[in-house]
Image (tube, rainbow, N blue to C red):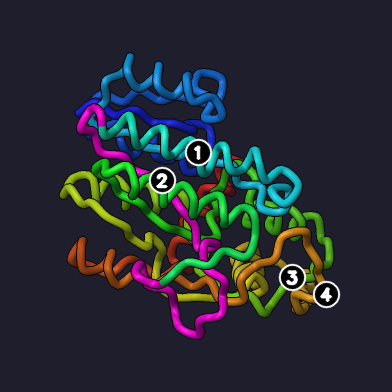
Amino acid sequence: MRILLTGRNGQVGWELERALSSLGELIATDRATLDLGDPDAIKRAIRQAQPDAIINAAAYTAVDRAESEAELAMRVNGIAPGVLADEASRLGALLVHYSTDYIFDGEKRLPYAETDSPNPINAYGRSKLEGEQRIAASGCRHLVMRTSWVYAPRGKNFFRTIANKLRAGDRLRVVDDQHGVPTEAKFIAEMTAALLRQPAEGTFNVVPQGLTTWHGFATEIGKRLGSRTVIDAIATRDYPTPARRPRNSVLDCARLSRQLGASPPQWQALLDRCTEAWRQID
């Protein structure tokens, strides 16, 4: 299998480059070698590589900045996946694409299933939903993996921000009325490889088991670091941001469990692994 990977330097892309290397020939690109904001560059790269699978790990992920850069977010998250999908359809290749819990409005009380109707409440979510819709409209073979609250021992993410602040002894105020599922980047890469081996197609929620709040996530990070720093629980209204966040963006991983024949681990177990990796590299 020949695989074209975009976004190799992102937190998910970094893990994917390692997890997918055993599946065949891997052609890994970054923004310098493949800018998803340039449709012609996308076409050239795919036609030159002639891949059997395209793994799109590149994305515009600045949720708050997307409110003022909606056009750029849409170009990368919405339009580019459509170009990738059209090229995949032409080749008969499989397109693997990563989406987000933020395509939902957060009004549902129970976890969101793959079949629930999306209704994004911020520019980032709208751009990611557009990407999903363009992929579906292309008719290409595709695997859309929706995930949430992604973190890793590398890059810019909630885990590293909290860990560094706790290490510095900074008192923290963290929102405690938004619910979701923290998802380790390495887990996403492992699940991608597992679904490719089957192979699987369609839309899957790719998250571990369990749920928490941002405050609960931060508290668990503090426990693993042995920190005594106070983490105050606050309401969303006390921490205003340019982009609205859904109150509940918990994703149901039942379909993933059925597909793989086993339930994913609890999110806390993956946090253990990430924390150990962070200690080794930071």
Residue type at numbered disc 2: Arg
Q: Which residue is mark 4?
A: 238
Count numbered badges in the picture.
4
Between discs 3 and 2, the one toward the N terminus: 2
Q: Which residue is mark 2?
A: 134
Q: Are marks 2 and 1 in contact (CB under 8 Å)?
A: yes
**In front: 170, or 70?**
70
Between discs 1 and 3, the one toward the N terminus: 1
**In front: 103, or 12?**
103
Q: Is residue 190 visible?
A: no
Instruction: Determine the image quadrant of residue 105.
Output: bottom right
Q: Which residue is mark 1?
A: 79
Lateral position of residue 60 relative to residue 252, left or right:
right
Q: Which mark is residue 174?
A: 3
Between discs 4 and 2, the one toward the N terminus: 2
Q: What secondary structure is marked by label 4?
A: helix
Between discs 4 and 3, the one toward the N terminus: 3
- Neighbour class for label 3 at 10 Å: few (<14), some, many (≥20)? many
Q: Position of residue 138 (x, y in %)?
A: 32, 42
Residue type at numbered disc 4: Asp
Q: What whole-number distance in Å separates the C-alpha atoms at marks 2 and 1?
A: 8 Å
Residue type at numbered disc 3: Val
* Start-end of magenta stretch: 90-116
The C terminus appears in which quarter of the rendering?
top right
Q: Position of residue 262 (x, y in %)?
A: 22, 67
Q: What whole-number distance in Å separates the C-alpha atoms at marks 1 and 4?
A: 35 Å
Between discs 2 and 1, the one toward the N terminus: 1
Between discs 1 and 4, the one toward the N terminus: 1
Q: What whole-number distance in Å separates the C-alpha atoms at marks 4 and 3?
A: 10 Å
